[in-house]
């Protein structure tokens, strides 16, 4: 949640456009009376504040994780995962060791070579 010092609609539109440009933003809501901007999603609040400060005064009010409802765990899924692991082990590929090649260069005097004396 961010507190913005905005005076007109133009600044509000700029703020909404800037925040919506970030990747990972799920939703944006604006409270005009309190001048607070609420953004949900996987974003970096410091980067967002730095961009918003180019045209208005911004303060970070609160930062928190989005709360997700707890889901019930199912035991049969674990059994299916174990079956997949067993099948993967049964059909595992064989990777033989690669042969090492050594590059050797030898220098020999060439008896036919021309010698200027």
Image (cartoon, rainbow, N blue to C red):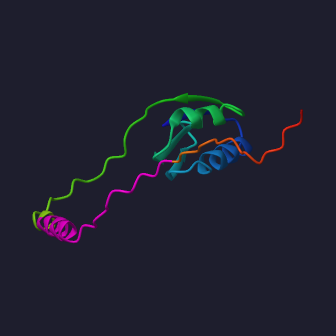
Query: Which residue is outermost to the right?
Result: 117
Q: Which residues are magenta?
A: 79-102
Residue 90, x across and y down, in percent: 17, 70
106 in the magenta segment: no
Residue 116, x across and y down, in percent: 89, 36
- Left or right of residue 108: residue 85: left
101 in the magenta segment: yes
Identify which residue, 105 or 34, lies in the foreground: 105
Residue 104, x across and y down, in percent: 54, 45
Q: Quadrant of residue 7?
A: top right
Q: Quadrant of the C terminus?
A: top right
Residue 41, x across and y down, in percent: 46, 48
Task: Give the residue at x 79% y 45%.
Answer: 113
- Left or right of residue 98: residue 69: left
Task: Give the residue at x 31% y 62%.
Answer: 95
Identify which residue, 10 or 52, lies in the foreground: 52
- Left or right of residue 29: residue 57: right
- Vertical relation: 117 (above or below) 31: above
Q: Quadrant of residue 64?
A: top left
């Amino acid at each position: 949640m961010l507190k913005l010092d905005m005076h007109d609609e133009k600044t509000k539109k700029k703020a909404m456009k800037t925040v919506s440009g970030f990747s990972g933003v799920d939703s944006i809501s604006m409270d005009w009376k309190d001048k607070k901007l609420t953004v949900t999603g996987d974003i970096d609040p410091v980067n967002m504040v730095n961009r918003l400060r180019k045209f208005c005064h911004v303060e970070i009010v609160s930062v928190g994780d989005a709360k997700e409802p707890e889901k019930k765990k199912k035991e049969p899924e674990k059994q299916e995962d174990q079956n997949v692991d067993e099948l993967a082990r049964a059909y595992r590929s064989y990777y033989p060791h690669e042969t090492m090649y050594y590059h050797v260069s030898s220098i020999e005097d060439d008896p036919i070579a021309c010698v200027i004396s």
